[in-house]
Image (cartoon, helix red, strand yellow):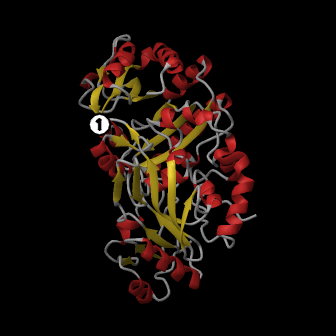
Amino acid sequence: MVAPEAPPDPDALKALLRGPVFLPGSAGYEESRSLWNAMIDRRPLAVARCLGAADVIAAVKFARERDLLLCMKGGGHNIAGLAVADGALLLDLSLMRGVWVDPRARVARAQAGCLLGDVDRETQVHGLAAVLGFVSATGIAGLTLGGGFGYLTRRFGWTSDNVLGMDVVTADGRLVRASEGENPDLFWGLRGGGGNFGVVTGIDYALFDVGPEVVGGLVAWPASEAPEVLGLYRAVAEAAPAELTLVALMRMAPPAPWLPKGIHGKPIVALLACYSGDPAEGERVVAPIKAFGKPVGDILVRRPYAQLQALLDATQPKGRRYYWKSEYLPRIEPALCAKFTEHAARIASPHSAVILFQIGGALNRLPAEHSPVGNRDARYVLNVAGSWERAEDDARNTEWARAAWSDMRPFGTGGTYLNFLTEDEGHARTEAALGRSLERLSRSKAKWDPENVFRTNKNIRPA
């Protein structure tokens, strides 16, 4: 579609907001509309860069009165680019990055424009951490509304399991509180049901004793050792205490300083580990990994937790082209490992990878109906992560990802992670992510957004 040149009454919109308004062609517009995934290139009608809930309320009312499409951007890190829509009024929350920590109550209140690194930085001052993801440049809002998992998930559950409350601007322009005690139906829907019910402006997270020092990092071996290394991964992961999270990955060796130049550009297999308990015990637990075979690189050491949270950032820079396919797994089977190695050998880009995230533990102990994110039978996440530079390579890389996923999908639970769904995946995949929660989510949608104002997402229509 061809996006309109400007919204009706742009001066009226500017007068309503404390934050700036960007129109096509004006300074700030291109920055605001740009996303992490360069495959997504959309042009909103205008950008309202909000500075607080009052700006969000004013922008939502402005859009409703003029029948404008709305979209919301926090970190802009979603693989499907859900933050930006053609011809929409974009509510850019990226300046709303305040974090307030109450160490006695063990709660962090974070504005919805925060990145994971913003929260980690403030909570680690007190030796506390929220359950967040693996890349510090990810936005907290999208991560949390889609479920969220990371190094602490095995101990404490999905990110959304550890949310205590949210501040939400509704479709009719009201600011409401969502928690177990206030609007519990809305609170339930927001903990993994996606961005269907309103504009979340603030999130309260439960905090846990983690850091400031953990044992974390990677050990890498030549890809020729993949069968043995993946066998080690299976054995250690199955017996691992909840404090230990393991990730297995295969890719071309990046030009990282911790890897010898002779291995750069060649296929490797690596294990990424985080032990979030006592560091001395962590060193003992990861010792078999460090001693295994003949590694070509080893940075699995004591380090600050916040540093570990940013360790993968360089592998996910803004402006590359990304296409992912994912599936939840109940276990790691030898036959899956063989397929994993086979498709890693066919990687079409030096930036792509096949990854196994360990998540089993606390999330499996809650009932399926606890929250929409569900998938309480998942113990691992398979992520076929395509990443490349040039548009002319799109077909080759997406075809690789689809083929690898299709071949390994039979090993899955049938479920998938909402936040890893790409632009081209339809409602059937949303059903795979949300399962039996869809009917209840649809009823909640009918109550909180009966006209489907918030629909530029993996949308759930009102019942």
Question: Does the image show residue 351?
Answer: yes
Name the residue: 41% across, 66% down.
Answer: 93
**Furthest-front residue in view?**
104
Give the image quarter of residue 403. Answer: top right
Looking at the rendered structure, the number of numbered marks drawn on it comes to 1
Q: Does 171 sit left or right of 162 as displayed? A: right
Name the residue: 63% across, 50% down.
Answer: 425
**Looking at the picture, does residue 26 appear above or below residue 257?**
below
Nearer to me, 347 or 131: 131
Give the image quarter of residue 407. Answer: top right
Give x and y (percent) for residue 159: 50, 45
Dot 1, crowdedness within 10 Å: few (<14), some or many (≥20)?
Answer: some
Q: Which residue is mark 1?
A: 212
Q: Does 21 sit left or right of 348 as displayed? A: left
Name the residue: 62% across, 58% down.
Answer: 184
Question: Does the image show residue 25?
Answer: no
Nearer to me, 121 or 224: 121
Quarter containing the N terminus: bottom right
Give x and y (percent) for residue 323: 51, 46
Secondary structure, mark 1, is loop
Give the image quarter of residue 127. Answer: top left
Nearer to me, 440 or 222: 440
Q: Does 174 sit left or right of 302 as displayed? A: right
Residue type at numbered disc 1:
Pro
Quarter containing the C terminus: bottom right
**Looking at the picture, does residue 173 appear above or below residue 321?**
below
Give x and y (percent) for residue 82: 53, 59
**Looking at the picture, does residue 187 appear above or below residue 335?**
below
Give x and y (percent) for residue 107: 41, 50
Nearer to me, 154 or 221: 154
